[in-house]
Image (cartoon, helix red, strand yellow):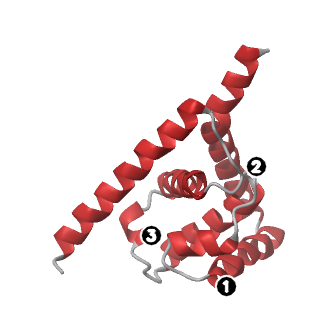
Amino acid sequence: MDIELIKVIKNQVIEELKKEYFLVKKTNDFNPNDKVKNKMFIMYATEVTCEYFKINMQLVMSGTRIRESVLVRYIVSFLCRDVCNNKIPFAQIGEYFGKDHCTALHGYREVLKISEVDKRYKQDVDKISELVKNGFYKEENNNEQKTE
């Protein structure tokens, strides 16, 4: 298949997922086992992490083993378990990146291990965690405050 065609199809899928995400968020109909919401969280966390490190999201999604893209996937695995209100299963995280659950679990553990010894890395992960938490759950929190 032509690489450009693959990119177009992938972008269309991402746009459809974004539409589903905003629909789910607008209705505020969250279910912890909802795969659509989980994918939306993973996608959002990936976008924020890519922006933070100034890495092309297409490169991360391609499954390449370039160090920078691997580290982004590791951090996203960590965010999906520690930032998300409902921990996303490693199988779903791995599936999103075209990997298996063991790869997502390994990424999660690597972030914990590196954070213990590298303070700058830990600061970066903490900043990204706050960005994701504030961005993804901001609208949900605003809706709760309005109803009180």
Depth check, mark 3 against mark 2: the one in front is: 2
Disc nearer the start of the sequence (2/1)? 2
The image quadrant that residue 91 belongs to is: bottom right
Label 3: which residue? 60
Structural crowding at the residue carrying mark 1, measured as other residues with C-alpha within 10 Å and reported as few (<14), some (14–19) or many (≥20): few
Question: Going by the image, does 12 lie left or right of 136?
Answer: left
Cα–Cα gap, marks 2 and 1:
22 Å
Residue 63: give x, y in percent of width and height. 44, 79
The image quadrant that residue 119 belongs to is: bottom right
Question: Going by the image, does 140 lie left or right of 58?
Answer: right
Q: Residue at x 35, y 58 (%)?
A: 13
Q: Is residue 56 visible?
A: no
Q: Amino acid at mark 1?
A: Cys
Q: Secondary structure at mark 2?
A: loop
Label 2: which residue? 85
Q: Residue at x 43, y 81 (%)?
A: 64
Image quadrant in which the C terminus is located: top right
Query: Viewer-proximal residue, 61 or 50?
Result: 61
Label 1: which residue? 102
Q: Residue at x 29, y 56 (%)?
A: 12
Q: Secondary structure at mark 3?
A: helix
Cα–Cα gap, marks 3 and 1:
18 Å
Residue 65: give x, y in percent of width and height. 47, 83
Question: Going by the image, does 103 lie left or right of 39?
Answer: right
Q: Is residue 124 visible?
A: yes
Depth check, mark 3 against mark 1: the one in front is: 1
